[in-house]
Image: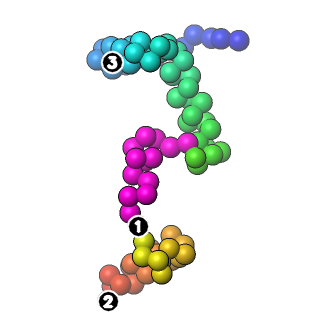
Amino acid sequence: MKSKLTLVLDRTTIDDAKSYARSHETSLSRMVEGYFRALMDSETSPAVRAPIVSSLLGIAHLPTEQASLSAKQLVADALAEKCK
């Protein structure tokens, strides 16, 4: 069952969102619903990421000897090195 929702946004955001929706042949309602669903899904599935996060994945590479270390161990090692 569909229900109405009122959102309060600045005019520029609304105009830009309408333009984006039109160019992608969808509606604002579908976009907002999709966004909310993605937010809820991301709580159970870390595979759903913001575009900026996805664009940053893979840009840094660890030396081979560090690739198998856990994130906690890498942070601990970096802090220990910094305190020397």
Rendered position, 82 above or below 59:
below
Q: Residue at x 36, y 14 (%)?
A: 19
Task: State how many labels appear.
Answer: 3
SS category of the residue bearing label 3: helix
- Kindly identify the amino acid type of the residue bearing the numbered disc 2: Lys
**Percent from the top left, x then y, of residue 9?**
37, 19
Q: Which residues are magenta?
A: 48-61
Query: Rounded to the nearest whole Å, what is the CA distance between mark 3 and mark 2?
Result: 51 Å
Quadrant (top left/top right/bottom left/bottom right) for the N terminus: top right
Rendered position, 68 above or below 3:
below
Residue ID for mark 1: 61
Labelled pair 3, 2 in contact (Cβ < 8 Å): no
Q: Residue at x 39, y 84 (%)?
A: 80
**7 or 36, which is in the foreground?**
36
Question: Which mark's residue is nearer the viewer, 2 or 1?
Answer: 1
Residue ID for mark 3: 16
**Earlier sequence position, callout 2 versus callout 1:** 1
- Kindly identify the amino acid type of the residue bearing the numbered disc 1: His
Query: Rounded to the nearest whole Å, what is the CA distance between mark 2 and mark 1?
Result: 24 Å
Name the quadrant containing residue 42.
top right
Q: Residue at x 40, y 15 (%)?
A: 23
**Percent from the top left, x then y, of residue 40?**
61, 36
